[in-house]
Amino acid sequence: MKCNKKAAILLPFALMLGSFAAAADVPEELQVSDTFPLEEPVSMTILMPQQSDVVDLEENVVFRLLKEYTNIDINLVTVPSQDGKEKLNLLINSNDYPDVIMGISLSSQDLEKYGVEEEILIPLNDLIDEYAPRISEQLEEHPNWRVDMTSSDGNIYGIPAVDSAGVGHVNSAMKYWINSQWLDNLGLEMPETTEDFKNVLLAFKNNDPNGNGIADEIPLSGCINSWNADPYLFLFNAFGYFDTNYYYLKDGKFQSILDQDYIREGLAYMSDLYSEGLIDPAAFTQDNAQLTALGNNADIEILGCSPAGHVGMLLDINNIPRYQQYAMMLPLEGPDGYRAIPYTKSVSVSGGYFMITDTCKNPEIAIQIADLFSDPIWTLQGQVGTRGVEWDYADEGTFGMDGVTPAAYKFLQYQTPAQVVDAWWWTYRGIEPDWKNLIQTDPDAIMDPANFESRLAFETSKLLPFAADVDPIPTLRFTTDDSTSFNQLKTAVNDYAKIAITEFITGARSVENDWDAYLADLESLGYGKMIELVQATYDAQTAE
């Protein structure tokens, strides 16, 4: 039975306040709340995605610490990460949905549908202001975020995820990593053009760069359902602007992507690479764990290059000799001279990563879970590991990754999710403060795994001169009817584009013979209508 969403149904907050006694097994540095642990336990159902690199959320260190510290009796419901949103929709349609949705990304349009229209998600404005001081502080520091988070009725229905206040390597995530030792072994230069890149891949395939006398090299791989590891994302940007919105904004006008001639040219190029055995067929089906297994091949390195948001998605960065072999490629120049990459210059937020539904009896407690994961120490516990094992407080007189800001923390070791064996890797991140810039950094040892985050930020800064000449897209606030239409169109176009791109590259479709049929499919799916709807919504907002 659903509960009333008004404040009158809330349990008196004073009754929920903890005794200020620390939970017995929770490290002191994590005891950051005046509310937790609760004096009397409350029950709460939380839906979370189960990622492939987190074996069991119930056994996750952070989840166990959360239950122990808060004294909340959490009924954890997990769904596979790759179809979390679809499973959530099924639960909502069956009227059997959880109190809290955590770690499943809902778009601004989803928030309009489930918040404004159906009132399944409750407004968070007052809860944030009263019970979430860390989130409130972030919104005061970044006032545009509150605007971005606000739906058409003036309410906030979801709290987005923000990686370390949006600074660092997340600003340009379409990166390619290449085995520079193989380049040296074969006397090759770092590729600058698409033609150079093909010649490098051919050499990787045919010239035994690992020197073992066996044709075991995989020139180029990748994976799906991960972070910018699809083989085509980076490569399309040698032909023209490409991102998975499938549209971009320039001078107030939205431009389509999928139906452009440069996409056809990019597909022809990648189809040629695939036909010559230069792209791993598994790149279009395998997950990140399988990709990492290639990078970590025990006997000898076999992976030439791969896309990934960061190089730790490919291999164990604590295998220092191998980690230091892989260098970031700069964007490639295509045959028409285009050379750019999507790059976020101004930080904005959209959608939601933490939502509270109208079944929740204690929303004032639930919001404080989101606030807890907007604390730097809980962020470090979930994203880096345990103090004294993976991290500690910085040495006196040291500086963060910018070389100016005093450091607050230091890495003792660094593990990416694929390397974690002690179940601390956590699947949720909140509106985080700027903690990465505060990591102690030795600029003379940037390739040391302890300086991993700093290396990624440094590498990303090299991409700024290649930032694509497009305009930032504000959070679009669709009307209820338009939101429903946009979601339907976007889903259909997304699903089709992924399949079609893969089939063109792998030869299941011919770029020469099937392009017109592909364009007709896009039209019938409403791709043009989707762009028109985005433009109309943007025009209405800018006219306000």
Image: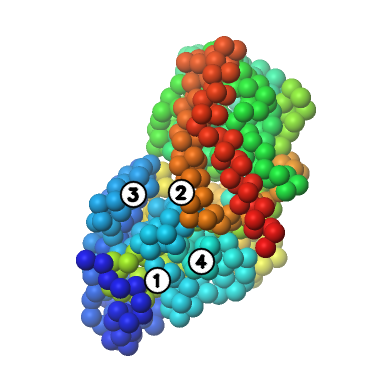
First in sequence: mark 2 vs mark 4: 4
Residue 524, horizontal then vertical, whole percent? 51, 29
Image coordinates for residue 279, horizontal then vertical, percent: 52, 21
Spatial CA span between label 3 and label 1 = 22 Å
Q: Nearer the viewer, mark 3 or mark 4?
A: 4
Between the residue at mark 3 and the residue at mark 2, the CA separation in whole angstroms equals 14 Å
Residue at label 4? 153
Determine which of the numbered discs, if any, sits on residue 367 in the image.
1
At a point 78% along the width and 28% down the height, the residue shown is 337
* In this rendering, position of residue 92 left or right of residue 243: left
Q: Secondary structure at mark 4?
A: loop
Question: Mark 2 = which residue?
Answer: 484
Q: Which mark sits nearer the N-terminus, 3 or 1?
A: 3
Mark 3 crowd level (few <14, some 14–19, many ≥20, 10 Å Cα) = few
In what quadrant of the picture does the N terminus appear? Answer: bottom left
The residue located at (46%, 77%) in the rendering is 126
Measure the C-alpha gap from mark 3 to mark 4: 22 Å
Q: Residues within 10 Å of mark 1 (few under 14, many from 20)?
A: many
Mark 2 → mark 4, Cα distance in angstroms: 16 Å
Q: Measuring from the top left, give residue 38's x and y in whole percent.
A: 29, 79
Q: Which residue is mark 3?
A: 89
> In the displayed structure, would residue 461 be above or below residue 283?
below
Give the camera-side residue of 362 and 543: 543
Dot 1 falls on a residue whose secondary structure is helix
**What type is the residue that disc 1 sits on?**
Ile
Dividing the picture into quarters, in which one does residue 400 lie? Answer: bottom right
